[in-house]
Amino acid sequence: TSHTGKSTLARHLAQRENWTAASTDQLARHPGRPWATQSKPLPPHVAEHYCTLTADGLLASVLAHYSSMPPAIAQYIGSQFSEFPSNRLALEGSALTPSNLIHMRLPNVSAIFLTADDALIKDRIQIQSRYHALENLEKGLVDKFTERAIRFNDLIVRDAGRFGFPYIHVRDETDLSE
């Protein structure tokens, strides 16, 4: 789920020889995070998405989006191996769910899932969104995103166990550097 350290781990792995890091975000992007950054204001369609849906609706929406992504993911992985057969790819992204991967049955592909406690997910989201400086409406959007992320995290824990995938329960950044 968001803010468990997927990008950090992928970047760490890509520091090794013949490794490349990539994100499923480059293949297709769901509405994204409901807060502005210094370089990009919050798009109106993203604000509307989070305003109009409940946390359960947000989770259903993102899961529907992710369920459409396996063909693009498989094609991307295949293209990386055909272009650089001796390389290794650290592909990260929330679209790489246990149920998506189990149904894709890709040879020579391994998966490790990252999970975290609710409090760590909430803290990281609040830090990145600069939550304490937001107006009440914006805080409400971030709260819904946080609730969706926590529910998604619970789904990953359940499905990783059900399908026999390993997962790392992240407590802090040092968990990913070992």
Image (tube, rainbow, N blue to C red):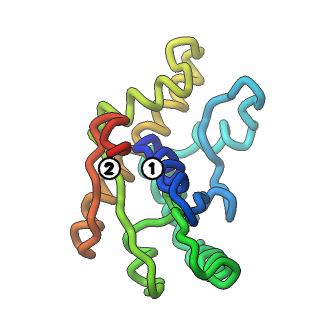
Q: Position of residue 152 (x, y in %)?
A: 38, 53
Residue type at mark 2: give it: Thr
Mark 2 and mark 1: Cα distance apart in space: 13 Å
**On the rendered structure, is 168 left or right of 129?**
left
| Callout count | 2
Circle 2 is placed at which residue position?
115
Residue type at mark 1: give it: Leu
Q: Position of residue 108 (x, y in %)?
A: 44, 83
Point out the tag, 2 or 1, that comes first from the N-terminus: 1
Query: Height in image: 58 above or below 158?
Result: above
> Does residue 121 appear in this view?
yes
- Contact, mark 2 vs mark 1 (Cβ under 8 Å): no
Q: Nearer the viewer, residue 8 or 105?
A: 8
Q: Position of residue 69 (x, y in %)?
A: 59, 72
SS of the residue under disc 2? strand
**On the rendered structure, is 175 left or right of 140?**
left
